[in-house]
Image (spheres, rainbow, N blue to C red):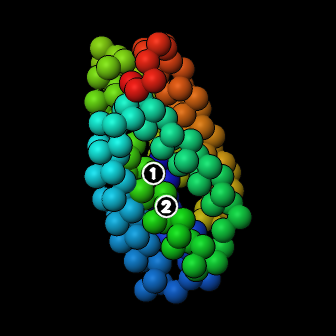
C-alpha cells in the first residue's frame, strides 16, 4: 500500500514529469488521503467498517495495477488523488478492523522495503508495482474472507 507514497515521484520523474511538479505528488497523495480518512469513518458508520475497508482495498489494488499504464502528468496527478483517497480509508480503518479480527496485529510482512528491493535500480518499476498491486489484492481478498467470517449474517459489519 505504501509503494506510491515512496516511489510515485521517482516514477513520475522517470516518465518525464518536471521535478517541481513531481514533488507536489506528495501533496496530491496526502490531500486524497485526508479526504479518504474522513470519508472512511463516515462511510464505516453507515455501511460497516469491513465493507468500507474491503472496497477500499479493491480500489487501491485496481489503482495500483492501473499505475502500470499511466505515464502522463495529468494521469499521475489523478492517480495520486484517487490512490490517496482509497489508501486513506484503509489507514483510517485498519487498526480498528484488525482489532475485531486478531489478538495481535503484528503478523505478516509486505511493504516498501520489499518493493524497494524488487525495483531494478530505478529504471524498471513494473515488478515493484505488480508486487504491490498483487499484495493489495490478496489483502482485499483476505479482508473479504474475514468480513464474511466475522459477520456472515450481517449486511453492515
Q: Residue 82 has which mark?
A: 2
Residue found at x 51% / y 40%: 55
- Residue 78 is left or right of residue 105, and the answer is right
| Quadrant of residue 29 within the rendered picture | bottom left
Q: Nearer the viewer, residue 71 or 115?
A: 71
What residue do we see at 59% from left, 53% from top? 64
Give neighbour class at mark 1: few <14, some 14-19, many 20+ (Cα, 10 Å).
many
Check disc 1 and report its element: helix, strand or loop: helix
Q: Quadrant of the C terminus?
A: top left
| Residue 79, picture quadrant | bottom right
**Residue 70, located in which quarter of the rendered image?**
bottom right
Q: What is the x, y in percent for residue 4?
A: 49, 58
The residue that mark 1 highlights is 86
Q: Residues within 10 Å of mark 2 (few under 14, many from 20)?
A: many
Q: Is residue 26 left or right of residue 12?
A: left
Mark 1 touches mark 2? (CB < 8 Å): yes
- Residue positioned 51% across, 73% down in the render: 77
Is 42 above or below relative to 80?
Answer: above
The local secondary structure at tag 2 comes to: helix
- Say above or below: 17 vs 106: below
**Residue displayed at 49% across by 14% down:** 152
Whether residue 92 sits left or right of residue 14 in the image: it is left
User: With respect to residue 113, does 68 lie above or below?
Assistant: below
For residue 142, say whether it is visible: yes
Give me the disc on residue 125.
none
- Residue 116 falls left or right of residue 131: left
Query: How far from the left and from the top, in percent, is residue 125?
Result: 64, 60
- Distance CA(mark 1)–CA(mark 2): 6 Å
Q: Confirm whether residue 14 shows in the render.
A: no
Q: Position of residue 7 (x, y in %)?
A: 50, 62
Amino acid at each position: 500500500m505504501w509503494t506510491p507514497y515512496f516511489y510515485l515521484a521517482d516514477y513520475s520523474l522517470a516518465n518525464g514529469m518536471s521535478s517541481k511538479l513531481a514533488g507536489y505528488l506528495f501533496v496530491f497523495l496526502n490531500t486524497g488521503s485526508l479526504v479518504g480518512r474522513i470519508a472512511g469513518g463516515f462511510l464505516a458508520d453507515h455501511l460497516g467498517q469491513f465493507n468500507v475497508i474491503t472496497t477500499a482495498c479493491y480500489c487501491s489494488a485496481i489503482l495500483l495495477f492501473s499505475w502500470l499504464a499511466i505515464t502522463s502528468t495529468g494521469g499521475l496527478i489523478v492517480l495520486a488523488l484517487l490512490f490517496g483517497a482509497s489508501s486513506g480509508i484503509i489507514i483510517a480503518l485498519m487498526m480498528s478492523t484488525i482489532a475485531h479480527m486478531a489478538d495481535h496485529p503484528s503478523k505478516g510482512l509486505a511493504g516498501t522495503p520489499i518493493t524497494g528491493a524488487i525495483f531494478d535500480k530505478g529504471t524498471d518499476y513494473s515488478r515493484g508495482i505488480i508486487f504491490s498491486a498483487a499484495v493489495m489484492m490478496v489483502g482485499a481478498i483476505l479482508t473479504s474472507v474475514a468480513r464474511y467470517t466475522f459477520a456472515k449474517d450481517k449486511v453492515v459489519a
